[in-house]
Image (tube, rainbow, N blue to C red):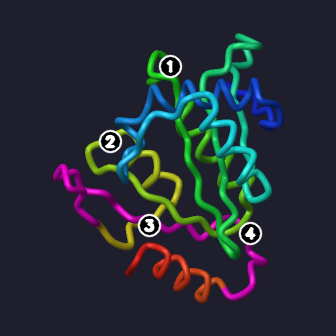
Amino acid sequence: MKKLKSTPIAEPWQVEIMRHIYNDNLDMLATRPLEPNDYHAQQDWWNANKSHLRGYLYEPLDRPGKFVAFLVLTDRGSFDTPIVAIQKEEWGGGYGQEIIRDYIEKANRPLAGSQLQSNGAICHINRKVGWQIVGTRTLENGEIVDLLYHPGINPHVENPEGIRETILKYHGL
C-alpha cells in the first residue's frame, strides 16, 4: 500500500527542503566525500544542472505538507543515477523501498548507483528490488562502497548490454 505522494521539485523553496534533508543525511550518502550545502550553493547547483535533473519531494499521505524525503534522478545519457535521502526521524517508516520502487519506475531505463556496505537497510532494499553489485571501492576512511547496476523495468530499452557496459565504465570498471 502506498504511503507517499511525490511532488516534482520546481521552486526554490522545494530546493531548500531538499537541501535540509540532504545535509542531515550526508553521513549515509557519502559514497564519496561530500560537504554540506548552504542555501546559495544548493540553489546555484540546482539552477546550473536542472536541465538534466528530475527531482521530487515525498510527503506521507497521512501528513500532507510534511516533506520527509527527496529523490533526484540525473540523466547520464543512456541511464540515470538516483540520489535519495529520508529525514532521519522518518527512518524505519517503510519509505525507502517505496521511493526506490518509485524511482525505478520514474527512470524507466537502466540505472547506476552506489551504496555504503555499512548501510544494511539500503543494501537489503536494493538487493530486494533488483540492484546488482558490479564492483566495490574503498573510501579513504575505510568504508566500502558497492557499485551498482539496475537494468530498469522497460523491456523495450535498446541495446541493454551496451548500456550495462557504459555503466561499468561510468563506475570505472
Q: Nearer the viewer, mark 4 or mark 1?
A: 1
144 lies above or below 94: below
Mark 3 and mark 2 residues within 8 Å of each other at the beta carbon? no
Q: Is residue 1 visible?
A: no
Image quadrant containing the N terminus? top right
Picture quadrant of residue 71? top right
Q: Secondary structure at mark 4?
A: loop
Task: Inspect the image, locate mark 2, and give the three-letter code of the amino acid beneath it.
Answer: Asn
Contact flag, marks 3 and 4 (Cβ < 8 Å): no
Mark 3 → mark 2, Cα distance in angstroms: 16 Å
Q: Nearer the viewer, mark 4 or mark 2?
A: 2
The residue beneath circle 2 is 119
Q: Amino acid at mark 4?
A: Asn
Cα distance between the residues tagged 4 and 2: 28 Å
**Disc sitting over residue 90 in the figure:** 1
| Amino acid marked by disc 3 | Gln
Q: Nearer the viewer, residue 153 or 86?
A: 86
Q: Residue at x 45, y 24 (%)?
A: 91
Disc 4 or 2, which lies upstream in sequence? 2
Q: Which residue is mark 3?
A: 132
Dot 2, how many residues are within 10 Å of its Cα: few (below 14), some (14-19), or many (20+)? few
Q: Quadrant of the C terminus?
A: bottom left
Find disc 4 in the rendering and name its residue.
154
Question: Distance between the Cα atoms at labels 1 and 3?
Answer: 26 Å
| 162 to 123, vertically: above or below | below
Count residues near mark 1 (Cα–Cα under 10 Å), then give few for <14, some for 14-19, many for 20+: few
Q: Main secondary structure of the magenta part?
A: loop
Of mark 4 and mark 1, the one earlier in the sequence is 1
- The amino acid sitting under disc 1 is Glu
User: Of residues 25 and 164, which is closer to you in this image?
Assistant: 25
Q: Specify the farthest residue to the left.
A: 142
Marks 4 and 2 close (CB-CB < 8 Å): no
